[in-house]
Amino acid sequence: LSHLHNVSDMFVFPGIGLGVTLCGAKTVTDRMLYVAAEALANYLTEDELSQGKVFPDLSTIRDVSKKVAIAVIEEAIRTGQASRLDEK
């Protein structure tokens, strides 16, 4: 079980850090963690799901981090925490 925890950290936390840094959020909320996990889960392909995989292929980690960062930034904007971004 700790292996799964380490793998989820490897996929999720770089994207959370990137998103928070880029948008200037002062805190990481529970909802940001939720949308980050959701972005990771949504990245799995139908083929990966049918194979019983719970994480995407490691070769996609950069793209996954980007998707997680976008989800975190969108949540920060939605809640008014994105101090470095203004809605346009």
Image (spheres, helix red, strand yellow):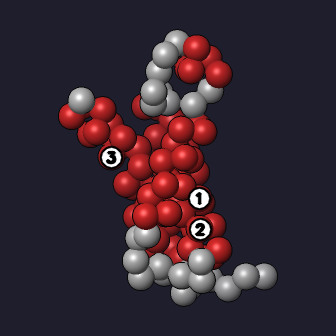
Callout 3: few (<14), some (14-19), or many (20+) C-alpha neighbours within 10 Å? Answer: few
Residue 37 on image: x %, y %: 48, 48
Q: Earlier in the sequence, mark 3 or mark 2?
A: 3
Q: Quadrant of residue 11?
A: top left
Read off the residue under disc 2. Answer: 75
Callout 2: few (<14), some (14-19), or many (20+) C-alpha neighbours within 10 Å? Answer: many
Secondary element type, mark 2: helix
Name the quadrant of the N terminus: top left
Q: Amino acid at mark 1?
A: Ala
Query: Is 81 placed above or below 37 here?
Result: below
Read off the residue under disc 1. Answer: 71
Q: Is residue 18 in view?
A: no
Residue at 30% in and 32% down: 4
Q: Amino acid at mark 2?
A: Glu
Residue closest to the far right: 88
Read off the residue under disc 3. Answer: 9
Q: Is residue 42 in view?
A: yes
Secondary element type, mark 3: helix
Q: Is residue 44 left or right of residue 37?
A: right
Residue 23 on image: x %, y %: 54, 76
